[in-house]
Amino acid sequence: MILSNARLIFADRLARGHVRVTDGKIAALSDQALEPLAGEPVIDLGGQFLAPGFIDIHVHGAQRRDAMEASSEAFAAICRHHARGGTTALTPATVTATSESILRVLQAAQEYRRQPSGDGAQLLGIHIEGPYFSKEKPGAHRLDLIRNPQRAEWEPWLAFDGLVTQMTVAPELPGALELFEELAGRGIIPSGGHSDAWDEDAAAAFAHGMRHATHTFNCMSTARRRGPYRVAGLLEFVLSEPEVLCELIADAHHVSPTLMRMLYLAKGPDGIVLVTDAAAGAGLADGETFQLGDIACVVRGGVSVTADGQTLASSTAGMIDLVRNMVQLVEISLVEAVRMATLNPARALRLEARKGVLKVGAEADLVSFTDDFQVTHTFVGGRNVL
Protein backbone atom coordinates (compact mmCIF):
# COMPACT_ATOMS: atom_id res chain seq x y z
CA MET A 1 0.00 0.00 0.00
CA ILE A 2 0.89 3.67 -0.24
CA LEU A 3 0.46 6.15 2.61
CA SER A 4 0.34 9.50 0.87
CA ASN A 5 0.33 13.18 1.83
CA ALA A 6 1.83 12.81 5.29
CA ARG A 7 4.04 14.89 7.49
CA LEU A 8 6.75 12.32 8.16
CA ILE A 9 8.43 12.38 11.56
CA PHE A 10 12.04 11.26 11.21
CA ALA A 11 14.45 11.02 14.13
CA ASP A 12 15.85 14.45 13.33
CA ARG A 13 13.28 16.33 11.24
CA LEU A 14 9.78 16.73 9.86
CA ALA A 15 9.21 16.42 6.11
CA ARG A 16 6.27 16.18 3.75
CA GLY A 17 6.25 12.82 2.01
CA HIS A 18 4.80 9.51 0.93
CA VAL A 19 5.53 5.95 2.05
CA ARG A 20 5.21 2.63 0.23
CA VAL A 21 4.76 -0.50 2.32
CA THR A 22 5.52 -3.91 0.82
CA ASP A 23 5.56 -7.28 2.62
CA GLY A 24 5.35 -5.62 6.01
CA LYS A 25 8.32 -3.33 5.49
CA ILE A 26 8.94 0.22 4.35
CA ALA A 27 9.80 -0.14 0.67
CA ALA A 28 10.04 3.51 -0.35
CA LEU A 29 10.09 7.02 1.13
CA SER A 30 9.62 9.92 -1.24
CA ASP A 31 8.92 13.63 -1.23
CA GLN A 32 7.18 13.07 -4.58
CA ALA A 33 3.84 11.29 -5.03
CA LEU A 34 4.28 7.56 -5.60
CA GLU A 35 2.52 5.96 -8.56
CA PRO A 36 0.32 3.06 -7.36
CA LEU A 37 1.02 -0.36 -8.76
CA ALA A 38 -1.86 -2.39 -10.16
CA GLY A 39 -4.31 -3.03 -7.33
CA GLU A 40 -2.17 -1.24 -4.75
CA PRO A 41 -4.32 0.56 -2.18
CA VAL A 42 -3.61 4.20 -1.34
CA ILE A 43 -4.45 5.83 1.99
CA ASP A 44 -4.44 9.62 1.73
CA LEU A 45 -3.47 10.93 5.17
CA GLY A 46 -4.39 14.49 4.24
CA GLY A 47 -1.40 16.09 5.93
CA GLN A 48 -1.58 14.10 9.17
CA PHE A 49 1.61 13.18 11.00
CA LEU A 50 3.11 9.76 10.26
CA ALA A 51 5.68 8.43 12.71
CA PRO A 52 7.34 5.15 13.54
CA GLY A 53 5.09 3.13 15.82
CA PHE A 54 5.50 3.75 19.53
CA ILE A 55 7.37 1.15 21.61
CA ASP A 56 6.29 0.80 25.25
CA ILE A 57 8.88 -1.07 27.31
CA HIS A 58 7.04 -0.73 30.62
CA VAL A 59 3.33 -1.60 30.63
CA HIS A 60 1.33 -3.93 32.88
CA GLY A 61 -2.13 -4.15 31.40
CA ALA A 62 -5.36 -2.56 30.19
CA GLN A 63 -9.12 -3.04 30.26
CA ARG A 64 -9.00 -5.04 33.51
CA ARG A 65 -6.48 -7.46 32.00
CA ASP A 66 -3.05 -7.88 33.61
CA ALA A 67 0.14 -9.53 32.39
CA MET A 68 0.18 -11.52 35.64
CA GLU A 69 -2.86 -13.47 34.41
CA ALA A 70 -0.33 -15.35 32.27
CA SER A 71 -2.78 -16.02 29.45
CA SER A 72 -2.90 -15.41 25.71
CA GLU A 73 -6.29 -13.78 26.17
CA ALA A 74 -4.84 -11.20 28.59
CA PHE A 75 -1.84 -10.46 26.36
CA ALA A 76 -4.09 -10.06 23.31
CA ALA A 77 -6.40 -7.64 25.13
CA ILE A 78 -3.45 -5.56 26.37
CA CYS A 79 -1.91 -5.44 22.90
CA ARG A 80 -5.22 -4.47 21.27
CA HIS A 81 -5.92 -1.67 23.72
CA HIS A 82 -2.50 -0.05 23.54
CA ALA A 83 -2.53 -0.11 19.73
CA ARG A 84 -5.28 2.53 20.04
CA GLY A 85 -2.70 4.86 21.54
CA GLY A 86 -0.24 4.29 18.70
CA THR A 87 1.77 1.52 20.35
CA THR A 88 2.99 -1.03 17.80
CA ALA A 89 5.29 -3.04 20.09
CA LEU A 90 5.45 -3.53 23.85
CA THR A 91 7.00 -5.54 26.65
CA PRO A 92 4.49 -6.44 29.37
CA ALA A 93 5.85 -6.10 32.90
CA THR A 94 5.38 -8.39 35.85
CA VAL A 95 4.83 -7.26 39.41
CA THR A 96 6.44 -8.53 42.60
CA ALA A 97 5.16 -12.09 42.89
CA THR A 98 6.21 -15.63 43.67
CA SER A 99 8.81 -17.24 41.46
CA GLU A 100 6.18 -19.66 40.19
CA SER A 101 3.88 -16.81 39.14
CA ILE A 102 6.68 -15.11 37.21
CA LEU A 103 7.55 -18.39 35.50
CA ARG A 104 3.92 -18.78 34.43
CA VAL A 105 3.99 -15.32 32.83
CA LEU A 106 7.16 -16.20 30.93
CA GLN A 107 5.73 -19.52 29.74
CA ALA A 108 2.50 -17.88 28.60
CA ALA A 109 4.36 -15.08 26.80
CA GLN A 110 6.59 -17.59 25.04
CA GLU A 111 3.53 -19.47 23.82
CA TYR A 112 1.75 -16.24 22.80
CA ARG A 113 4.69 -15.18 20.64
CA ARG A 114 4.47 -18.50 18.74
CA GLN A 115 0.89 -17.77 17.70
CA PRO A 116 -0.05 -15.98 14.43
CA SER A 117 0.07 -12.19 14.64
CA GLY A 118 -3.02 -10.77 16.29
CA ASP A 119 -4.83 -7.48 15.81
CA GLY A 120 -2.83 -5.39 18.25
CA ALA A 121 0.68 -4.36 19.18
CA GLN A 122 3.50 -6.89 18.92
CA LEU A 123 4.65 -8.49 22.16
CA LEU A 124 8.45 -8.24 22.10
CA GLY A 125 9.24 -9.87 25.45
CA ILE A 126 8.75 -9.53 29.19
CA HIS A 127 10.05 -6.88 31.58
CA ILE A 128 10.52 -8.48 35.01
CA GLU A 129 9.72 -5.69 37.46
CA GLY A 130 10.15 -7.07 40.96
CA PRO A 131 10.61 -8.85 43.28
CA TYR A 132 14.13 -7.47 43.85
CA PHE A 133 13.21 -4.12 45.38
CA SER A 134 14.00 -2.06 48.43
CA LYS A 135 11.31 -2.45 51.07
CA GLU A 136 11.62 1.32 51.51
CA LYS A 137 10.42 1.91 47.93
CA PRO A 138 7.82 -0.76 47.16
CA GLY A 139 5.30 1.39 45.31
CA ALA A 140 2.15 -0.61 44.59
CA HIS A 141 3.91 -3.95 45.08
CA ARG A 142 3.35 -6.46 47.85
CA LEU A 143 5.84 -5.78 50.63
CA ASP A 144 5.71 -9.38 51.89
CA LEU A 145 6.98 -10.71 48.54
CA ILE A 146 9.93 -8.33 48.13
CA ARG A 147 13.24 -10.17 48.49
CA ASN A 148 16.93 -10.16 47.56
CA PRO A 149 18.21 -11.64 44.28
CA GLN A 150 19.12 -15.33 44.40
CA ARG A 151 20.74 -17.02 41.39
CA ALA A 152 18.77 -20.19 41.99
CA GLU A 153 15.57 -18.19 41.53
CA TRP A 154 16.41 -15.83 38.65
CA GLU A 155 18.47 -18.19 36.52
CA PRO A 156 15.40 -20.18 35.35
CA TRP A 157 13.73 -16.89 34.34
CA LEU A 158 16.65 -16.06 32.07
CA ALA A 159 16.59 -19.54 30.53
CA PHE A 160 13.74 -18.39 28.25
CA ASP A 161 16.06 -17.46 25.41
CA GLY A 162 15.45 -13.94 24.12
CA LEU A 163 12.20 -13.51 26.07
CA VAL A 164 13.24 -11.39 29.06
CA THR A 165 14.01 -7.90 27.77
CA GLN A 166 14.56 -6.02 31.05
CA MET A 167 14.80 -6.52 34.79
CA THR A 168 14.26 -3.82 37.40
CA VAL A 169 16.46 -4.32 40.46
CA ALA A 170 17.36 -2.12 43.43
CA PRO A 171 21.17 -1.71 43.14
CA GLU A 172 21.84 -1.76 46.88
CA LEU A 173 20.51 -5.27 47.50
CA PRO A 174 22.87 -8.17 48.28
CA GLY A 175 23.28 -10.08 45.02
CA ALA A 176 22.21 -7.18 42.79
CA LEU A 177 25.64 -6.53 41.27
CA GLU A 178 26.04 -10.15 40.18
CA LEU A 179 22.59 -10.00 38.58
CA PHE A 180 23.30 -6.71 36.77
CA GLU A 181 26.48 -8.21 35.32
CA GLU A 182 24.64 -11.33 34.18
CA LEU A 183 21.86 -9.32 32.55
CA ALA A 184 24.27 -7.05 30.71
CA GLY A 185 26.19 -10.06 29.44
CA ARG A 186 23.02 -11.59 28.04
CA GLY A 187 21.85 -8.42 26.29
CA ILE A 188 19.00 -7.85 28.77
CA ILE A 189 18.41 -4.30 30.04
CA PRO A 190 19.74 -4.05 33.63
CA SER A 191 17.58 -1.32 35.13
CA GLY A 192 17.81 0.37 38.51
CA GLY A 193 14.54 1.10 40.25
CA HIS A 194 12.33 0.77 43.33
CA SER A 195 15.50 1.64 45.16
CA ASP A 196 16.75 3.40 48.28
CA ALA A 197 20.34 3.35 47.00
CA TRP A 198 23.06 5.77 48.02
CA ASP A 199 25.32 7.34 45.43
CA GLU A 200 28.01 4.67 45.84
CA ASP A 201 25.47 1.86 45.41
CA ALA A 202 24.35 3.36 42.11
CA ALA A 203 27.95 3.82 40.98
CA ALA A 204 28.72 0.19 41.76
CA ALA A 205 25.69 -0.93 39.77
CA PHE A 206 26.80 1.23 36.85
CA ALA A 207 30.24 -0.40 36.99
CA HIS A 208 28.47 -3.78 36.74
CA GLY A 209 26.33 -2.89 33.74
CA MET A 210 23.34 -0.80 34.85
CA ARG A 211 22.53 1.58 31.99
CA HIS A 212 18.81 2.16 32.53
CA ALA A 213 16.53 3.68 35.16
CA THR A 214 12.97 2.49 35.78
CA HIS A 215 10.27 5.22 35.91
CA THR A 216 12.65 8.01 36.92
CA PHE A 217 11.60 10.00 40.03
CA ASN A 218 9.07 7.33 41.08
CA CYS A 219 10.11 4.90 43.86
CA MET A 220 13.66 6.19 43.67
CA SER A 221 16.05 7.52 46.32
CA THR A 222 17.09 11.14 46.13
CA ALA A 223 19.65 13.38 47.85
CA ARG A 224 19.62 13.24 51.67
CA ARG A 225 21.91 13.73 54.61
CA ARG A 226 24.24 11.07 55.91
CA GLY A 227 25.53 12.52 59.13
CA PRO A 228 26.48 16.13 58.36
CA TYR A 229 26.90 15.49 54.60
CA ARG A 230 24.48 15.76 51.69
CA VAL A 231 24.74 12.60 49.54
CA ALA A 232 23.15 11.79 46.18
CA GLY A 233 20.73 8.95 45.64
CA LEU A 234 19.85 6.88 42.59
CA LEU A 235 17.94 9.81 41.08
CA GLU A 236 20.90 12.18 41.06
CA PHE A 237 23.20 9.45 39.80
CA VAL A 238 21.06 8.64 36.74
CA LEU A 239 20.46 12.34 36.03
CA SER A 240 24.19 13.00 35.97
CA GLU A 241 25.38 9.90 34.10
CA PRO A 242 25.12 10.37 30.30
CA GLU A 243 25.14 6.63 29.58
CA VAL A 244 22.02 5.90 31.63
CA LEU A 245 18.73 5.94 29.74
CA CYS A 246 15.87 7.20 31.90
CA GLU A 247 12.28 6.02 31.69
CA LEU A 248 9.63 8.69 32.21
CA ILE A 249 5.92 8.23 32.89
CA ALA A 250 4.94 11.54 31.29
CA ASP A 251 1.25 11.37 32.24
CA ALA A 252 1.59 14.59 34.32
CA HIS A 253 0.44 12.67 37.41
CA HIS A 254 3.42 10.46 38.26
CA VAL A 255 5.85 13.30 37.56
CA SER A 256 4.98 17.00 37.47
CA PRO A 257 5.72 19.12 34.38
CA THR A 258 8.53 20.89 36.25
CA LEU A 259 10.25 17.59 37.00
CA MET A 260 9.66 16.39 33.45
CA ARG A 261 11.35 19.56 32.21
CA MET A 262 14.23 19.01 34.63
CA LEU A 263 14.74 15.50 33.29
CA TYR A 264 14.76 16.79 29.73
CA LEU A 265 17.34 19.45 30.55
CA ALA A 266 19.52 16.86 32.30
CA LYS A 267 19.27 14.03 29.77
CA GLY A 268 18.35 15.66 26.47
CA PRO A 269 16.18 14.10 23.77
CA ASP A 270 18.35 10.98 23.48
CA GLY A 271 18.41 10.13 27.19
CA ILE A 272 14.70 9.63 27.87
CA VAL A 273 12.37 6.72 27.10
CA LEU A 274 8.66 7.44 27.45
CA VAL A 275 6.73 4.60 29.13
CA THR A 276 3.07 4.37 30.13
CA ASP A 277 3.48 1.95 33.06
CA ALA A 278 -0.24 1.47 32.36
CA ALA A 279 -2.05 -1.22 34.33
CA ALA A 280 -5.43 -2.91 34.08
CA GLY A 281 -7.08 0.44 34.83
CA ALA A 282 -6.15 1.78 31.39
CA GLY A 283 -9.32 2.17 29.36
CA LEU A 284 -11.60 2.26 32.43
CA ALA A 285 -13.75 5.16 33.59
CA ASP A 286 -13.19 7.16 36.75
CA GLY A 287 -14.28 5.18 39.80
CA GLU A 288 -13.94 1.76 38.17
CA THR A 289 -11.90 -0.83 40.06
CA PHE A 290 -9.31 -3.37 38.95
CA GLN A 291 -6.43 -5.50 40.21
CA LEU A 292 -2.70 -4.82 39.84
CA GLY A 293 -1.42 -8.33 40.37
CA ASP A 294 -3.49 -9.12 43.46
CA ILE A 295 -3.63 -5.54 44.81
CA ALA A 296 -7.03 -3.81 44.66
CA CYS A 297 -6.90 -0.49 42.78
CA VAL A 298 -9.23 2.19 41.44
CA VAL A 299 -9.14 4.79 38.65
CA ARG A 300 -9.36 8.24 40.21
CA GLY A 301 -8.75 11.60 38.59
CA GLY A 302 -7.31 10.10 35.42
CA VAL A 303 -4.74 7.93 37.20
CA SER A 304 -4.68 4.56 38.99
CA VAL A 305 -4.28 4.41 42.76
CA THR A 306 -4.47 1.66 45.34
CA ALA A 307 -7.93 1.17 46.83
CA ASP A 308 -6.96 3.13 49.94
CA GLY A 309 -5.93 6.08 47.76
CA GLN A 310 -2.46 6.24 49.32
CA THR A 311 -0.23 5.03 46.47
CA LEU A 312 -0.05 5.55 42.72
CA ALA A 313 -0.67 2.23 40.99
CA SER A 314 0.43 2.73 37.40
CA SER A 315 -1.07 5.06 34.82
CA THR A 316 -4.08 4.93 32.53
CA ALA A 317 -2.24 6.66 29.67
CA GLY A 318 -1.50 5.64 26.11
CA MET A 319 1.79 6.47 24.44
CA ILE A 320 0.20 9.23 22.34
CA ASP A 321 -0.77 10.96 25.62
CA LEU A 322 2.85 11.00 26.73
CA VAL A 323 4.04 12.44 23.43
CA ARG A 324 1.36 15.15 23.64
CA ASN A 325 2.33 16.03 27.21
CA MET A 326 6.00 16.38 26.35
CA VAL A 327 5.09 18.78 23.53
CA GLN A 328 2.44 20.77 25.37
CA LEU A 329 3.68 20.74 28.97
CA VAL A 330 7.46 20.49 28.59
CA GLU A 331 7.42 22.49 25.34
CA ILE A 332 9.86 20.34 23.42
CA SER A 333 9.62 19.70 19.69
CA LEU A 334 7.33 16.99 18.32
CA VAL A 335 10.36 15.38 16.65
CA GLU A 336 12.11 15.02 20.01
CA ALA A 337 9.01 13.77 21.81
CA VAL A 338 8.40 11.11 19.16
CA ARG A 339 12.06 10.06 19.34
CA MET A 340 11.58 9.33 23.05
CA ALA A 341 8.70 6.99 22.17
CA THR A 342 10.29 5.29 19.16
CA LEU A 343 14.03 5.34 18.48
CA ASN A 344 15.11 5.57 22.12
CA PRO A 345 13.20 2.46 23.31
CA ALA A 346 14.30 0.66 20.12
CA ARG A 347 17.91 1.48 21.02
CA ALA A 348 17.37 0.21 24.56
CA LEU A 349 16.14 -3.10 23.10
CA ARG A 350 18.87 -3.11 20.41
CA LEU A 351 16.23 -3.08 17.69
CA GLU A 352 17.02 0.28 16.11
CA ALA A 353 18.07 -1.34 12.82
CA ARG A 354 14.47 -2.37 12.15
CA LYS A 355 12.12 -0.62 14.58
CA GLY A 356 11.54 2.93 15.81
CA VAL A 357 12.69 4.58 12.56
CA LEU A 358 11.37 5.68 9.20
CA LYS A 359 13.78 4.19 6.70
CA VAL A 360 13.65 1.82 3.77
CA GLY A 361 13.92 -1.76 4.99
CA ALA A 362 12.57 -1.07 8.48
CA GLU A 363 9.46 -2.85 9.66
CA ALA A 364 6.28 -0.99 8.70
CA ASP A 365 5.27 -0.28 12.30
CA LEU A 366 3.67 3.13 11.86
CA VAL A 367 1.23 5.49 13.56
CA SER A 368 -0.65 8.41 12.04
CA PHE A 369 -2.20 11.14 14.15
CA THR A 370 -3.76 14.57 13.87
CA ASP A 371 -2.54 17.94 15.06
CA ASP A 372 -4.54 17.46 18.27
CA PHE A 373 -2.88 14.06 18.91
CA GLN A 374 -5.75 11.81 17.89
CA VAL A 375 -4.46 8.49 16.53
CA THR A 376 -6.08 7.63 13.19
CA HIS A 377 -4.13 4.55 12.06
CA THR A 378 -1.82 2.08 13.76
CA PHE A 379 0.06 -0.26 11.44
CA VAL A 380 1.96 -3.28 12.76
CA GLY A 381 4.07 -4.88 10.05
CA GLY A 382 1.95 -3.03 7.51
CA ARG A 383 -1.38 -4.27 8.94
CA ASN A 384 -3.86 -1.68 10.20
CA VAL A 385 -4.71 -2.87 13.74
CA LEU A 386 -6.55 0.17 15.08
Image (cartoon, rainbow, N blue to C red):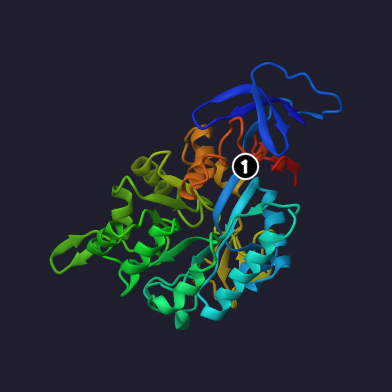
For the question of whether residue 285 can be seen, the reply is no
Q: Position of residue 128 (x, y in %)?
A: 50, 66
Which residue is pictured at 68% across the width and 56% down the height? Answer: 79
Q: Mark 1 = which residue?
A: 53
Q: Amino acid at mark 1?
A: Gly
Q: Position of residue 76 (x, y in %)?
A: 72, 60
From the top left corner, tell me how far across and down residue 15 is, in percent.
59, 22
In front: 262, or 45? 45
Residue pictured at 65% horizontal, 71% vertical: 70
Residue 132 occupies which quadrant of the picture? bottom left
**Dot 1: element:** loop
Q: Can see residue 51?
A: yes
In this rendered view, identify the residue nearer to me: 325 or 382: 382
In the image, residue 294 lies at what x, y percent? 59, 78
Whether residue 213 is situated above or below residue 359 in the rendered picture:
below
Question: Quick one: quadrant of the N terminus?
Answer: top right
Left/right of residue 179 with respect to residue 36 in the rendered view: left
